[in-house]
Image (spheres, rainbow, N blue to C red):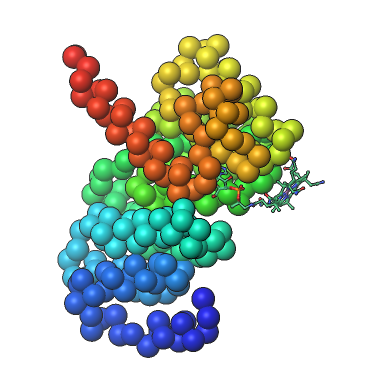
Amino acid sequence: MSDEEKAGAEDIDLNALSDQELVEQMWDDLYDGIEEPITEGTNILLSRKWLPYDVLTKALIEGMRIVGVDFRDGILFVPEVLMSAGAMKAGMKILRPLLAETGAPTLGKIVIGTVKGDIHDIGKNLVSMMLEGAGFEIFDLGVNVSVEMYLEALEKHKPDILGLSALLTTTMPYMKVVIDTLKEKNIRDDYIVLVGGAPLNEEFGKAVGADSYCRDAAVAVETAKDFMKRKHNILASTPN
Ligand code: B1M
């Protein structure tokens, strides 16, 4: 964001805006990746008696949805999306404890990590932030994650989705090790497994037995949402 844009953003008196104007301003600020007005806007909406869940969905998640669309369409690039995600996190920091208190619904739980032998985490972090922005609860195991660590996290957090990231051709095969271990333990079908990382492709995702390969963070969000919808539909149509 240019100094000019930053100065412009600082000039706006957020308190003087109507609720709708403020929300739209927050979408712009998320898009531009500026943290301060997101923090301020979040606090203003809460002081106007907005529910934390409404601030999350109507101001932050909707703003990140717009960012995600432009990222997918090649209008925004990685550094910009990381800044947007950072601004989103500033709002989330205020809302997270309030949401925990009010028990706001999440779209689903996701355990994610970069596989053993691999320390690349920029893409995985971006995916995690975008998924969190979309309303998922994320358990990020970090980098260099062994199959034992994944299993422990699955047991502990009981997620809907397991996300695996790899950036090296030498670590990609470890995804198969993780998925094969789930099969051996007869728990493969308990989870939706999504894989991603620059050297992967759709064919590789199928070959290792993942449910889907996600090209980028925007696709990861859409894919995770789709699978959750399908999961809920299956559960709804299963007789007790
Ligand atoms: Co490394 N590195 N690196 N590196 N590095 C690559 C991957 C490489 C392609 C560079 C090159 O040679 N051209 C090459 C791999 C070659 C290969 O395997 N054939 C390489 C190498 C060789 C290495 C080392 C071995 C170098 C060395 O030490 N000799 C070493 C490996 C260390 C290790 O892991 N054991 C190494 C180290 C490093 C740094 C530490 C310096 C640094 C990482 C810093 C960090 O991550 N904290 C680094 C970086 C930055 C890169 C490049 C330049 C950029 C990667 C990146 O962050 N991209 C990379 C070259 C490249 O990819 N152009 C390279 C931006 C990021 C947003 O994209 O990660 O693809 P990406 O994530 C995308 C999607 O892939 C997808 O969504 C993301 C967002 O849109 N996605 C997922 C990713 N994970 C997902 C998980 C999902 C869903 C989607 O789950 C649901």
Q: How many marks?
A: 0
| Res 41 quadrant in image | bottom left
- Looking at the image, residue 33 sits to the left or right of residue 184; the answer is left
Q: Between residues 202 and 149, which one lies in front from this camera angle?
A: 202
Q: Residue at the spot x=31%, y=27% of the render?
A: 231
Location of residue 216 in the rendering, given as x and y in whole percent from the top left corner = 52, 46
Q: Residue at the spot x=31%, y=67% of the render?
A: 42
- Looking at the image, residue 121 sits to the left or right of residue 24; the answer is right
Task: Decide if residue 24 is in sight here.
Answer: yes
Q: Residue at the spot x=56%, y=38% of the render?
A: 196
Q: Residue at the spot x=19%, y=77% of the render?
A: 18
Location of residue 126 in the rendering, given as x and y in whole percent from the top left corner = 52, 52
Task: Decide if residue 93 is in sight here.
Answer: no
Q: Residue furthest right?
A: 170
Location of residue 28 in the rendering, given as x and y in whole percent from the top left corner = 37, 71
- Looking at the image, residue 108 sits to the left or right of residue 161; the answer is left
Q: Is residue 21 above or below residue 115?
A: below
Q: Is residue 209 above or below residue 4?
A: above
Location of residue 220 in the rendering, given as x and y in whole percent from the top left corner = 46, 42
Quadrant in which the C terminus is drawn: top left
Q: Is residue 64 above or below residue 237?
A: below
